[in-house]
Image (cartoon, grey):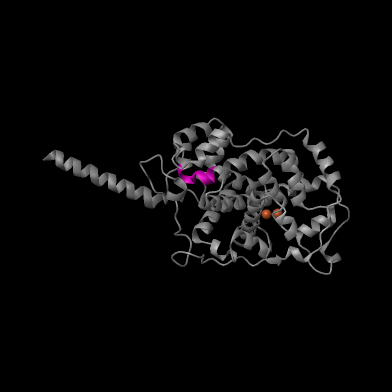
Amino acid sequence: MPLKFLFLFLLVGIVLYFFYRRFATGVTVSTESTENRSETLTDYSSLPGQESGTAPVSPREVISYDLTRYSWGAAPAQAEAEKILRDFLKDVPPPRTISPRLEELLSNPESNVQEIARMVSLDPLLTAQILKVANSAYFRPSGAPRINSVHRAIILLGYNYLRVLLLEYFFRRTLEKCTSLPPQEFLKIWKHSIEVSAILGSIALARRYDVGVYTTAGILHDIGKFFLPLFPSSQEFSFSQGEEDLPPLKEEEIRYGFGHTLLGKLVVKTWDLPPEIEAAVGYHHPVSRLEFLDLPPESRKIAAWVTLADHLAHLYGRFGGDYVYEVPGWVYTFLGLKSPEGLITRELLWGLKRASSLAEAL
Ligand SMILES: [Fe+2]
Ligand SMILES: [Fe+2]
């Protein structure tokens, strides 16, 4: 008889513990180490509005530019830019990136979290960064127990966001050495890049594309902006000189002879990253249909998705600034979409909110 009571007492205790973990931390606790964490950690409760489907959140009010309305130079300064860039980068070691084994583990939702935690823990600075984000206000609501283990932090973040965090960590170390941008400006572009990377991660996950390549393309898409200050500004440009507000990309072209897309493409080429990433960086603000159609199919696909992800991050993210570039109709046609509305689901916005919070915590 006392044994029965003991068993009942234990059972009630276990049930109460699971309820506490679920509602106090907002995280689903599973005894299986093989689940897809990105999916199981989904919690859309903080987004107001309808039950499913299209998003209830309104876009931010920003200035919208149609880049196809402007005339663009043939980048005569490209050869000179490439030479200056190569000279500059020859003393900068190429960025470290995610190892093939870790990428393999992150790409498989059945992977053992212990092995990932063990690999990540080899780098103390990276470990500290992961724990810092996991303990930030968004990921660890007040009252929830402090996260002290990398294993637990990875479960909380999910594999997709861990990947974004790793890319952020590896590339930022190199980029900080390369740029003379003021820290505030650097961080603003970088945090926007994290948002774009996370959007691309969720698109790639849903469509079974290579998540590693898509998230890398996202984090690097504006990389050219960090290198622009290397080049002399050809003239002092101010908005008052123009008859209308020009898009920032056009302003870059006037100042330097080329924009961040071309410069970013040259950086990625110099670092010998995959051609799809080079295309994504170089063509994420498409201005010519012919140039876009000229890309190889895989490159065109990723460039189109980065164009769209960048557009969504400017409209719905926290760090996109006060403008957005319209997505040309032929990009939608190529992707088989009528407009971005179908893409803006509660899930996507929830993911973007997580990415913004992750960027905020850095
Ligand atoms: Fe851009
Ligand atoms: Fe961007």
Residue 323 picture location, percent across and down: 69, 63
Residue 202 picture location, percent across and down: 53, 52
Question: Is residue 305 highlighted in magenta?
Answer: no
Q: Residue at x 58, y 40 (%)?
A: 166
Q: Is residue 246 visible?
A: yes
Q: Locate the C terminus by quadrant.
A: top right
Q: Residue at x 72, y 42 (%)?
A: 268
Judged by its main secondary structure, the magenta piece is helix
Residue 157 picture location, percent across and down: 49, 45
Is residue 249 depicted above or below 281 in this figure? below
Question: Is residue 159 highlighted in magenta?
Answer: yes
Q: Locate the N terminus by quadrant.
A: top left
Residue 318 horizontal side relative to residue 110, left or right:
right
Ligand 2 located in image quadrant:
bottom right
- Magenta stretch bounds: 155-162
Viewer-nearest residue: 87 or 186: 87
